[in-house]
Image (tube, helix red, strand yellow):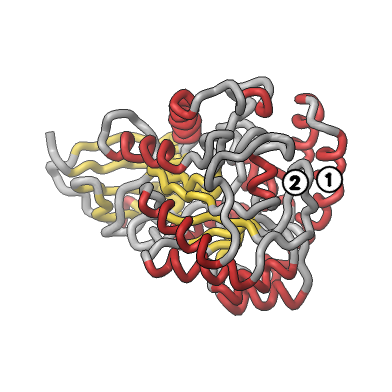
Amino acid sequence: MSSIRAVTAAALIAGNGKVERDAVLVIEEGRIRAAGSAASIEVPPNAERIDARGCTLMPGLIDTHVHLGAFNCTSFGSARTARFEVTPQLQSFYALFHAQLCLEMGFTTLRDAGRGTPRGDFAEEMCAVRDAINAGIVAGPRLLILAETVITGGHLELLTLPRAMPRPENFTADGPWALRRKVRELIRSGADGIKTSVSGGVALGTSPDVRNMTQEELDAIVDEAHAFRKPVAVHCFNPEGLHMCVNAGVDTIEHMVYSDADSIKRVRDAGTWVIPTLLNRSDYVIEKNVRLGLPPSLIATQRSIQPDCFRTFRSMRESGVRIAMGTDIHNVPEMGCAAKELELYVMHGMTPMEAVETATRNAAQALGLGAELGTLEAGKIADVIAV
């Protein structure tokens, strides 16, 4: 069998703004040799030909913010009950199952944004899932694993454990030196990057607009991670947090909630990537949470922040902030529905092609993978789907 394959398709979306009709994609040893219109590309005579003329070819989709280890409503009726009944070992298998569901939906690369358990962080288990996929033991998408630094009394702590529950040893860290040590421990565990939180969020016992850590603490996390050449993603809901993120030089800002003109300008001027996660603020998710019986106070918080989320998205897009697709799939929304995120981008001002590019070229660049993934161009990895 030839090592060269030529895929013919009705169209090809390159992910960089170009669309070719009556297209051909030539692949050699796992990399793109040529991509474009059939009239412009000479297919080698020894190529294996694949007929996909009823489909459109496009880059594999990338979701930059998922929680594969979460007790998702696809798998569990009650996330709060499951977290006390499911062992980390079994949770790892569910994480793999969730990753495979996303792959079936066309998402070939996922960045897992961390998930603590009542026994502590879940970084080693998620790294094991990633490594098993990379070794070819099991099938799955490309995974990048973020591990969390958790501040006492902050969003990430209360999202994982109710206030009345005892905490595992070293579950939280406070102050720059303790956080530096925590970053080192998480990197030692195999994490591809670090996740932290500078503000509250939508969790019992927290307020979305409050600060969760000091600038000194965030600076320490970013400096230590960058010393190991690891990126930092930061959960942020408020303007103060946006300024803190820019000051510290974080790599990606997670979520779009409260903002003002000055904070948006600073994020744009810094060139920092922002991950919207609008799906988690949508009516679709709020209504599903109501059916699942979430506390009324949480539902009220979700409804109250929704207008600000959509306003911030529109303002950031219009201002030229760099946006990469991310869903925040965790307990709800369900695994496999990530494409609904792109629908929301179009509803709130993007063109369909802009939305596609947030999940291809932009997402690859935000994750530092732009040289190899995100567009169908000669020399890049042949990471391609047919739709």
Query: Circle 1 is placed at which residue position?
Result: 301
Residue 141 percent across, percent down from the top left: 40, 38
Of residue 65 and residue 347, the one placed in the foreground of this image is 65
Of residue 222 and residue 119, the one placed in the foreground of this image is 119
Residue drawn at point x = 13 percent, y = 38 percent = 2
Is residue 37 placed above or below 117 in the rendered structure? below
Q: Is residue 149 left or right of residue 6?
A: right
Q: Is residue 74 left or right of residue 285?
A: left
Q: For mark 1, does the 10 Å Cα neighbourhood hold few (<14), some (14 to 19), or many (20 or more) residues?
A: some
Q: Which of the image's four quarters has the N terminus?
A: top left
Q: Quadrant of residue 337?
A: top right
Residue 328 percent across, percent down from the top left: 61, 44
Could you tell me the amino acid type at mark 2? Val
Residue drawn at point x = 41 percent, y = 58 percent = 184
> Distance of mark 2 from mark 1, alpha carbons?
7 Å
Residue 199 percent across, percent down from the top left: 70, 59
Is residue 92 placed above or below 297 in the rendered structure? above
Q: For mark 2, does the 10 Å Cα neighbourhood hold few (<14), some (14 to 19), or many (20 or more) residues?
A: many
Of residue 163 and residue 17, the one placed in the foreground of this image is 163
At mark 2, the secondary structure is loop
